[in-house]
Amino acid sequence: MKPTYKIMRGKATLLAFLALSSLSARELRVVTTTTDLKSITEAVGGAYVSVSSISTGKQDPHFIDARPSYMIMLRRADLFIRIGLEMERGWESLVLEGSRNRKIQLGNPGHLDASAGIERLEVPTGPVDRSLGDVHAMGNPHYWLDPYNGRIIARTIADRLGQLDPEHAAEFASNAAQFTRRIDEAMFGSGAVEEMWAGQSNGERAPAQGGWSAILAPYAGTQVVTYHRSWSYFLRRFGLITVGELEAKPGIAPSPGHLLRLIDMMQTKQVPLIIMASFKGNKAPRMVAGKTGARIVKVPYSTNGNDVAVDYIAMLDQIVRQVAAGLKQ
Amino acid sequence: MRMMTVITAIALTATPLLPQTAQTRYVNLSFSGLFSAGGATVSGADLLALQSGAHDPRVTGFTVQNLELSLTGAIDPFLNGEVHLIFQIDAEGESLLEVEEAFLTTRSMPLGLQVRAGTFFTGFGRLNPQHPHSWSYVDQPLVNNRFMGGDGLRGPGGRISWLTPLPWYSELTGGLQNANGETAVSFLGSPEEELFLDRPLVEREAAGLADLLKTVTWLNAFVPSANLAVNVGLSGLFGPNRTGPDGATTILGADLFAKWQPPATDQGWPFVTLQFEGMWRQYDASANAEAGLPAATLEDAGWYGQVQWGFKRGWIAGLRHGQVYASGGPADGSADRSRWSANLSYYPSEFSKVRLQTNLDDGAFLDRDNIFGIWLQFEFLMGQHAGHKF
């Protein structure tokens, strides 16, 4: 029996070697649920990954049909990355099950929830039911709109890519660090980043010399209204304060009665801006803007939401600049 | 400057994490209630014949169309489970409980294979496997009522499907189910009438594999452009019928579903969908010496086509037309029929809907002129978020 065991062990080792070498010889196939996760994965994975996204960036990622073509995208994927926090709950399990791909099912290394490590906002503490609208029991899922969270997502993805492809783990970590630095430069301007990276200033005292931070700093404390509660992470990061939404309750279409109360409140507080995702309807915000004089900033909240938002950083850059332009007028 | 420093500090200070609490999801529960109210220019037995689907609104006044309790969840690392129990109050006011579906599906078979076993809707065409709360109309198309039965074709059995390695979604499925029971009317089912397509029915039990219901389907999905997705399916059903020992039924079908959406959508709106199903049935009737009937082959066919236009967030307008063609016999249920339906649906949220539908039926099968019907439907859904199936 012993020789047989040895042969079997030898075969198993050979098979494991072949499996690993075939994996390392080719790109990791990654499918993300959103274009933002795709953009960050491409930045981190570099030449060692091929990435596709299920949503296009122009849709609300919650409301996607479980098309069979998505199951084909996932059929041979090595890694599936989702936003999580129930963002994809309407279709994720259907496409995962339909893909017949064991590697990417929940609980396997090929299944990554990018929200791991994120400080979640608006996590309900009391009873939650649907009379409150589409409240996400695990917290607000629009966390990618905070550039700081973009850094965390990059590290989370780098760690998982390194686990799946250990040979290139160091490059993934290095790419994530470079991506983090690009975000920092966009956020604070290259001068401030140089200072921080040189160790001349710790984070808490770093001067906001430029970048998004400086662009929006003059407006910190300004009260704004949003269409849906998608902007909490973005607004908190830049010190803007939301005082209401066009939707009376999350996910429920704006009602005339609620809009009248909102108009009254906006006039009283002199709210200057309505921020909305570009796929939302214009009718309600235009009506409110017409009555209050507030300006509407309609921006894509995902990469590839328009021709300018070509990657994650370009998408955030567009939002920052348009919000600033809206507040400047 | 002070505010700048504060913003910077937020950005660069490690943020405390809330504990990621585990969520137990052993069973996901949901309950759907589907009700309607309305009437037609016929009533009583004629209305029952007009609206022949078991979940159709069938009486003047109020109908409890479908109360469905669904339980889904992972059984273990290898299997998923799904159970759908139906509570109904029928046209006579009697409460009914039905096990509509209860089955397991494999989670981790290799080579793109998946097995389902238990009792379930036969995967023939697009509409038969769908539950009433997923329908775009308050009632079933005429062709489904006639060929698949008022409750939809379903029964105990097993099936295996294979997601082929072709570059597009191409799934082949083969299934075996019992051919008896009241939900298999074209086969060994037990319709209330003693005649089916004018042929007397006899008692017949399954004696071997040949007497089971065999299903073969081939579903293909294409994405011709970023805005358009199309499913095309072919289905075949083969099984025994109750006209005698040699009685056999074949049903062949083709279905098409296409959905167009612009690049930017708000909660899935706007959209246009087109759905078509056609079916053809060959009913090989045994000779019946007692009734003096020779063996015969009866054929009939039917189809429906529908367009749904989601024109504004929450709103859908629909138009459907369907026809069934007789096999040549004058008996009820085999006559030529046609129906136009138009409806308007409003979804206040993903979890409720209100629908107003009008039907215009050719009344010749009841020796009448056109029959007009109007139905108001209401649905609510509690519990687990329903999947956005395509």
Image (cartoon, coloured by chain):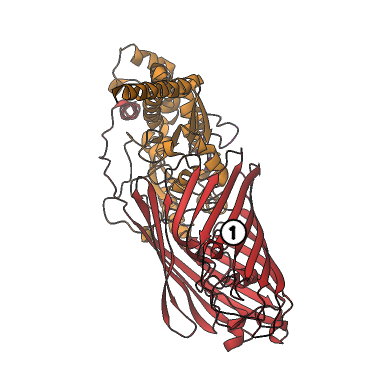
Chain colours: A orange, B red
Instruction: Describe residue B292's horizontal placement relative to residue B344 as left or right.
Output: right
Q: Residues within 10 Å of mark 1 (few under 14, many from 20)?
A: many
Residue at (60%, 45%) from the top-left corner?
B170
Q: Nearer the viewer, residue B213 or B95?
A: B213
Asked if the magenta segment contains residue A283, the reply would be no
Regarding residue B243, the answer to whether it shows in the image is yes
Placement of the N terminus of chain B among the 4 image quadrants: top left
Q: Nearer the viewer, residue B82 or B7?
A: B82
Q: Residue B159, how many percent across, how many down?
A: 50, 54
From this view, report whether residue B370 is shown above or below residue B306. below
Rendered image quadrant of residue B323: bottom right
| Chain of the residue under the numbered disc 1 shown in the image | B
Q: Residue B254, how many percent across, how many down?
A: 67, 58
Q: Residue B269, how many percent across, how many down?
A: 57, 53
Asked if the magenta segment contains residue A305, the reply would be yes
Q: Nearer the viewer, residue A303 or A283?
A: A303
In magenta, the rendered stretch is A297-308
Instruction: Describe residue B260's horizontal placement relative to residue A323 as left or right.
Output: right
Most frequent secondary structure within the magenta stretch: loop
| Disc 1 residue type (three-letter) | Arg
Regarding residue B370, the answer to whether it shows in the image is no
Callout count:
1
Q: Residue A174, how many percent across, how many down?
A: 40, 17
Q: Secondary structure at mark 1?
A: loop
Name the residue tied to disc 1. Answer: B126
